[in-house]
Amino acid sequence: MGIVRLITIAVLIWLAWALYRRFIHYKNSAISASREKQKKPVIKAVKRCAVCGIHIPENEAIKKQDHYFCCEQHSNQDSV
């Protein structure tokens, strides 16, 4: 009966350790997910439309030659 008790204790310790590790993993993934939601997009540069003068993020701007435009309609105008 001593060996059965020893195996039972070992299984219970292993089960407790596995549940603890799963809880820590879940907690860490929940924290990192909430941090991802809180992050704001980084805008590295803001460019000015060559036609109307509005400022827009560089990744949203339309670039033709050395000029930036806020929309396709402005990029097709010849007033630059």
Image (cartoon, helix red, strand yellow):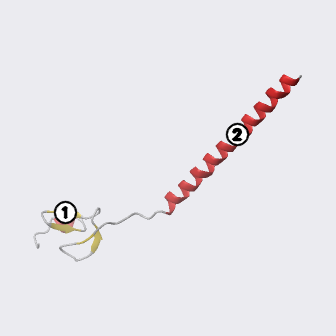
Q: Earlier in the sequence, mark 2 or mark 1?
A: 2
Of the residues shown, which amino acid type is indicated by label 2? Trp
| Rendering quarter of residue 70 | bottom left
Q: Is residue 26 above or below residue 43?
A: above
Q: Judge whether 8 appears above or below 70 on screen.
A: above
Question: Where residue 36 sits: x, y (%)?
Answer: 49, 57
Q: Residue at x 13, y 66 (%)?
A: 66
Label 2 packing within 10 angstroms: few (<14), some (14-19), many (20+): few
Depth check, front residue: 29 or 5:
5
Please, what secondary structure does the residue beneath circle 2 have? helix
Please give left or right for residue 32 compared with residue 9 in the image: left
Name the outermost residue toward the front: 2
Q: Residue at 70% of width from left, 41% of height from top?
A: 19
The reply, left or right, for residue 57 in relation to residue 28 is left
> Residue at (28%, 68%) from the top-left corner?
45
Crowding at dot 1, Cα within 10 Å, few <14 / some 14-19 / many 20+, comes out as some
Foreground disc of the pair 2, 1: 2
The image position of residue 6, as x and y in percent, is 82, 28
The total number of labels drawn is 2
Q: Mark 1 falls on what kind of element? A: strand
Camera-side residue: 6 or 42? 6
**Residue that protrudes farthest toward the bottom in the picture:** 53
Q: Position of residue 16 (x, y in %)?
A: 74, 40
| Mark number, residue 17 | 2
Q: Which residue is labeled 1 in the image?
A: 63
Quarter-of-image position of residue 68: bottom left
Q: CA distance from mark 2 to mark 1?
A: 57 Å
What kind of residue is marked 1? Lys
